[in-house]
Amino acid sequence: SDDEYAYSFAVIGDPHTPQHAAGNLETMFEWIENNKTTKNIQYAFCVGDLSNTNSDSDYTRIKACFDMLSIPYSVVRGNHDFDVTGNDFTYDNGINFNKYFGADQDYASQFTGENGGIYVGLADQNTQYSETSVANAYRTFEVSGQKWLFLNLDFGAPDDVLEWACDVVEGYPEHRVIVNTHGYTYSNGTRTGSEPNSYTTAVQLNSGEDIWNKLISKYENMEIVFSGHHLY
């Protein structure tokens, strides 16, 4: 029954805009908004692949969907949200990702101040995550007396990002931690091993197994990792 929901979080799988037929994508967001009270939905996470081709038209549609929500949410980049030719990645600092989400102060402001932060530093040998990038970000969140730490990691987050993430988690030992990233497990629940470090980049990306060893397994307050990429 509805009163069983002390509170809940919504998790949105890979949208792959515009692969959804007209209206289908929007219906999913309408459902979240229409059920936020009965399900007591406090926050929504999207696990990446917001776009299908990293185009402005893809981002215009998916951003309009998120704008339907009156609850806070966070998004991460998937492999389709980069400039990609085959498996050759261009770490372009998420030009469209940050154009549509990082530049939205209503969205980005949750990662500023005392209760949040973003990673600024190495993206690859040619570019950096800048002060306006929200590809790697965290915020704290409290609901029903429970303290949460929400940690967003870019697809295949490199070592410098994972070291930053460790520092963040260590600063919040009393918070339960949710990590949101695009690639972490295969569809059978086992952690990824050869992907995404099989992609060609100027810096080594980390697989799900790498993220487990370098971040997740280190901390007892890790609650769950949300991820997409490999669909059921």
Image (spheres, rainbow, N blue to C red):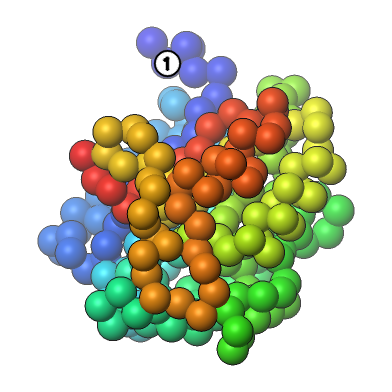
Q: Residue at x 45, y 77 (%)?
A: 201
Q: Residue at x 44, y 26 (%)?
A: 38
Question: Observer-nearest residue: 99 or 154?
Answer: 154
Question: Observer-nearest residue: 102 or 212?
Answer: 212
Residue 74 in sight here: yes
Horizontally, is 215 left or right of 90 in the view? right
x then y, percent, for residue 135: 57, 66
Question: Observer-nearest residue: 113 or 86?
Answer: 86
96, above or below 224, in the image: below
144, above or below 23, in the image: above
x then y, percent, for residue 40: 51, 28
Residue 69 in sight here: no
Q: The residue tagged with tag 1: helix, strand or loop?
A: helix
101, above or below 178, in the image: below
Q: How many marks?
A: 1
User: From the image, which quarter does the C terminus lie in?
Assistant: top left
Question: Observer-nearest residue: 140 or 109?
Answer: 140
Horizontally, is 134 left or right of 175 in the view? left
User: From the image, which quarter does the N terminus lie in?
Assistant: top left
The residue identified by callout 1 is 2
Q: Residue at x 13, y 61 (%)?
A: 21
Query: Circle 1: is it few (<14), some (14-19), or many (20+) Cα within 10 Å?
Result: few
* Residue type, mark 1 in image: Asp
Horizontally, is 175 left or right of 46 in the view? right
x then y, percent, for residue 5: 49, 18
Q: Residue furthest left?
A: 21
123, above or below 161, in the image: below
Q: Residue at x 35, y 79 (%)?
A: 88
Horizontally, is 85 left or right of 167 in the view? left
